[in-house]
Image (spheres, helix red, strand yellow):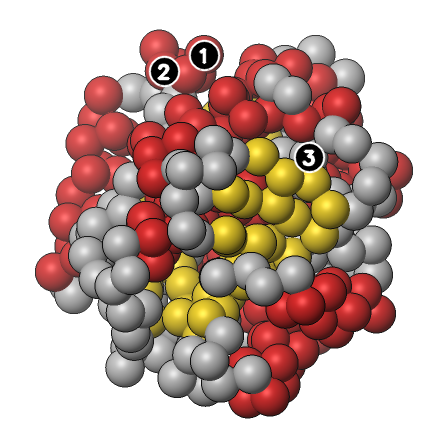
Amino acid sequence: MANSMRLAAGAVGLALVLAGCGSAPEDDDNGSGTGGSKLSACMVTDTGGIDDRSFNAASWAGMQAASKSTGAKVQYSASTSENDYVPNINSLISKKCGLIISVGGLMAEATGQAAKANPNQKFAIVDSASVPPNVYGMEFNTAQSAFQAGYLAAAMSKTGKVATFGGLPIPPVTIFMDGFYEGVQYYNKQKNKKVQVLGWNEANPKSGSMANSFTDQGAGKRIAGNFIQSGADIIFPVAGGTGLGAAAAAKESGGKVSVIWVDTDGCQSAAQYCDVFLTSVMKGIAGAVQTTIETAAKDQALTGSYLGTLQNGGTGLAPFHRFDSKVPAELKAELEKIKQDIVSGSIKITSPNQPKVS
């Protein structure tokens, strides 16, 4: 399977999908497609909703893009809690879905068990490695692009304090926070500065700030408010829809606080907050899901797994959009050099949450 996923194309697709996401049907199973393909591709969302402006929405964007390019019939089943994972997967198996895609590492156990019990069923999963041979894993080393974001935040901060918080203390979340933390430390070392990171210390992850939800915007706003009171002027929420609360808090600051969004280009997925989005740490979920379905639609084997990196375009920073004129040319050049050094191995990221290269 090709390693090059369409990060930019996926972002464009997400923007188109989100135009209608807010009015998604109430029932759990939702479908679209031309019906011109033998393949039926089905998705189980993680909690947070199909219009979370983050990983669920990005996955569904990839599904819909694949439907347009292949004629595959696509549908999703929404999970409102972890208790929904198993019944949702089993329901899609009973519906004879040709490919079932689970969104989120929290579904790894349920997906693995279903795959072992149904060895002829094709599965794929976002944010988890493949274990049974009939599961195709899609992972992303977002510590790399988050490292760039941390460096950027440290350089742009006027208070010398930046912050991050997560939705849950799980590797697909803390990998972003690790990379961000390491990027700030790298900036401090290179520039002889002492920019502080509130909410996360890679050496002491148990002390990290967590909202314990991907849907609670109120919690996101409270956490961001506490960071702002403590002096942070750039916040990196890694919490799906919960992070929208942080964006709201930043918007109320009157331009004093900015946000770095996660998973998708925030100016496309949550355009109402574009004024406060310095950039976004993008994860190429939409492109990965689209390519996976396109491969399956051609009756090609889904073997091994996919790892999105800076090198293959599976992760990266979004444009600065309305902040573009405020980011110095010298800093932009430094960020590009950092990217090159991460790809070459000159800069080594040490996050223990990075996917293992098989």
Amino acid of disc 2: Asp
Quadrant the N terminus occupies: bottom left
Find residue 15 and report its horizontal and vertical position in percent. 50, 23
Q: Distance between the Cα atoms at labels 1 and 3?
A: 24 Å
Find residue 223 and report its horizontal and vertical position in percent. 80, 44
Find residue 201 and report its horizontal and vertical position in percent. 58, 65
Relative vertical location of residue 3 with respect to residue 18 in this rendering, above or below: below
* Residue located beneath label 2 in the image: 324
Q: Dot 3 lies on which element? A: loop
Residue visible at 68% across and 35% down in the picture: 51
* Residue located beneath label 1 in the image: 322
Relative vertical location of residue 55 with respect to residue 89 in this rendering, above or below: above
Q: Are marks 1 and 2 in contact (CB under 8 Å)?
A: yes
Amino acid of disc 3: Asp
Is residue 96 found left or right of 89 in the rendered image? left
Is residue 27 found left or right of 261 in the rendered image? right
Q: Nearer the viewer, residue 142 or 99?
A: 99
* Residue located beneath label 3 in the image: 51
Q: Looking at the image, is mark 1 or mark 3 earlier in the sequence?
A: 3
Question: Callout 2 environment at 10 Å: few (<14), some (14 to 19), or many (20+)?
Answer: few
